[in-house]
Image: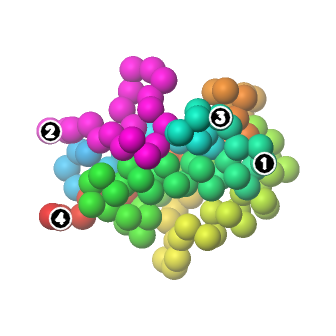
Amino acid sequence: MKRAVFSKEALAPVGPYSQAVVSGSLVFVSGQLGVNPADRKLGNTIEEQTRLALSGISSILAETGSTMNDIVKTTILLADMNDFVAMNGVYAEFFEEPYPARAAYQVVKLPLNAMVEIEAVARLKER
């Protein structure tokens, strides 16, 4: 059994996918871009885009009762691996030990010409 999750505080899907799906005891959060959901504009810097992407993930998780501390795995897609250090600085603001497992990749291009996209898998908090 699975159910879709939606938050108005995160960027609305731009295709046939859910912001997140709950399946069993896990929440699978779709890749979030560094877009301000209010005006649908990309942040101007890698730091701003990273903060917006992670804030979107946090908002989506809140709809399930989970938090950033419940994330067990993230995947980060970067348009330029040279942005890794700056992205990592902001990323560290959102997590505490034990940190989630993580992978980071440079890709050829991201939607909307974004600099970063982040997806996550989290534990579902029991209500």
Tell which tag, 3 or 4, sits nearer the viewer.
3
Few, some or many C-alpha atoms within 10 Å of disc 2 (few <14, some 14-19, many ≥20)? few
Q: Earlier in the sequence, mark 2 or mark 3?
A: 2
Is the C-beta separation of discs 3 and 4 under 8 Å? no
Q: Quadrant of the C terminus?
A: bottom left
Tell which tag, 4 or 1, sits nearer the viewer.
1
Label 4 amino acid?
Glu
In three-dimensional space, the C-alpha distance between marks 4 and 1, rounded to whole angstroms, equals: 37 Å
Q: Give residue 98's position: percent from left, percent from top.
A: 49, 77
Label 1 amino acid?
Thr
Residue designated by label 4: 126
Numbered range of the magenta stretch: 1-20
Which residue is located at x 50 percent, y 65 percent? 100
Q: Is residue 48 left or right of residue 40?
A: right
Which residue is located at x 26 percent, y 37 percent? 4
Residue designated by label 2: 1
Tell which tag, 2 or 1, sits nearer the viewer.
1
Q: Is residue 8 above or below residue 40?
A: below
Q: Earlier in the sequence, mark 3 or mark 4?
A: 3
Few, some or many C-alpha atoms within 10 Å of disc 4 (few <14, some 14-19, many ≥20)? few
Which residue is located at x 63 percent, y 43 percent? 34
Residue designated by label 1: 45
The answer, for residue 33, to whether it is visible in the render is no
Q: Give residue 83's position: percent from left, percent from top.
A: 80, 51
Rendering colour mode:
rainbow
The kind of secondary structure the magenta stretch mainly shows is loop
Is the C-beta separation of discs 1 and 3 under 8 Å? no
In three-dimensional space, the C-alpha distance between marks 3 and 4, rounded to whole angstroms, equals: 35 Å
Say what secondary structure mark 3 lies in. strand
